[in-house]
Amino acid sequence: MRIVYLHGFASSPKSSKALFFKERFAECAVPVEVPALDDGDFTGLTITRQLEVVERTVANRPATLMGSSLGGYLAALFAARCPAVEKLILMAPAFRFPSRWRELYPAAEMEEWRRKGVWPIYHFGSRGPQPLGYQLVEDSQRYEDEPEFSQPALIFHGMRDDVVPVEFSRQYASRRPNVTLRLFDSGHELSEVLEPMWWGVRRFLGIERPGSDRLG
């Protein structure tokens, strides 16, 4: 078993959730790879380039993808295109990412971003604003709002999520028998429910700690 963890938008491999799950998987002797999805160029970020990073990391070898927010959406996109992906674990996945720009940004702001070419975005990894190119908006239009994958998937979502509406995951899971949805009384980050999520992950993947009884 190997895990490829995909961090969220404007985040990094050192995100708190990435580090938490990497540590927990290490206790169970499960390798985890956490690529930097911007590949060192946040300004030039696109969905296509991020999928290329995932492709290089998975390397057409069996893997479980675990993704947070935009990383969850990328995991779903990639799984729909790559049979090497065995299972998915998605945390507040940013379904409908391509169509939500107009909801999240006023029309005048979007036009100014397009005209200038870049827009300052707070980057959680560097803890400060970084310029992001408008090509992310344009490139995202090449991709579907709700990727169709056939692999078993576990979705965690907070009922108080004010970034990605929980209804997106509810609707997605309700139409797909391969998807299990678990809801928490939490916000988008899900930071206060890491331990319950970990227990859910262990059960979903059938992971046991060394020297412990196997979980069903």
Image (cartoon, rainbow, N blue to C red):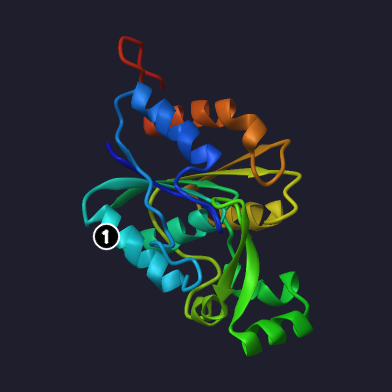
* Three-letter code, disc 1: Arg
- Which quadrant of the rendered structure holds the C terminus? top left
Residue 98 located left or right of residue 201: right
Q: Give the labeled residue for mark 1.
A: 56
- Measured as percent of width and height from the top left, residue 199 is found at 51, 25
Dot 1: element: helix
Q: Is residue 138 above or below residue 17?
A: below
At a point 54% along the width and 82% down the height, the residue shown is 138
Residue 91 located left or right of residue 45: right
Closest to the observer, 19 or 72:
19
At a point 48% along the width and 50% down the height, the residue shown is 12
> Residue 76, located in which quarter of the rendered image?
bottom left
> Residue 102, located in which quarter of the rendered image?
bottom right
From this viewpoint, which residue is outermost toward the bottom?
A: 115
Closest to the observer, 48 or 206:
48
- Measured as percent of width and height from the top left, residue 101 is found at 66, 74
- Which quadrant of the rendered structure holds the N terminus? top left
Residue 194 located left or right of residue 54: right
